[in-house]
Amino acid sequence: MSFVLPRHCLRAFLLFLSLSGSVSGLARDPWDVVKDGRPLFNPQTFFSGRTHSWGIFETRSGDPSKILHTQTVGHWEGGVLKFEQDLEIEGSKKSHRSWSIRRVDAHHYSAVGTGIVGTARGEAHGNAFHLDFTIDAIPGNPLAHLHMSQWMYLQPDGVTMVNRDTLTKAGVIVAEITEQFHKDR
């Protein structure tokens, strides 16, 4: 007994394969897209002084779930950017974070701070800054560690930054955050 695909199924399958190849052909180094972006994103400049943000948590399926707001004040101290951040998440108690970010070389950064497990690693090129770290979602419970990947994009006005966070556990997306920061002049 032989199995023959109907002609319309075969066409759909071939179209799927050709589109899959086209999409995978688009995969490249993410820095290629933003490396020439302007203005240059300099984390130590952007986060020095006052910034505030508004954002939204999204579930795994992309549905909005909670609104968030931050107020941040940063300053340079001995070659280290230190900033204090008040975070309000809808339905949760207000929390406070303290961060220290050190520039390692022309493009790389390391950071430690409240809720970070170990050291965060950052990289900046063009108008983008990527920060990668593990957060302690429930302090003291190692089973509640989540991986966070933050992509920040400085906008042409030099005072607005769009931030996209992806939180994962064992490689599975748990939540995403879309947030807009504004630097006070």
Image (cartoon, rainbow, N blue to C red):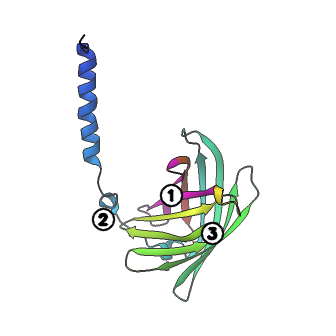
Query: Alpha carbon of mark 2 to alpha carbon of mark 3: how far?
Result: 28 Å
Measure the C-alpha gap from mark 1 to mark 2: 18 Å
Residue on which disc 1 sits: 163
Q: Label 1 crowding class (10 Å Cα cut-off): few <14, some 14-19, many 20+?
A: many
Which amino acid type is marked by label 1?
Answer: Asn
Looking at the rendering, the stretch of residues picked out in magenta corresponds to: 144-172
Depth check: 180 or 133 in front?
A: 133
Which of 170/36 is in front?
170
The residue that appears at 51% across and 86% down in the rendered structure is 79
Residue type for callout 3: Thr
Residue 90, placed above or below residue 123 = above
Question: In x, y percent, where is residue 138?
Answer: 69, 58
- Residue at 70% from the left image edge and 67% from the top image edge: 96
Foreground pick, 5 / 165? 5
Quadrant, the N terminus: top left
Q: Which mark is on residue 72?
A: 3
Which residue is pictured at 41% across the width and 74% down the height? 108
Residue 160, x across and y down, in percent:
49, 62
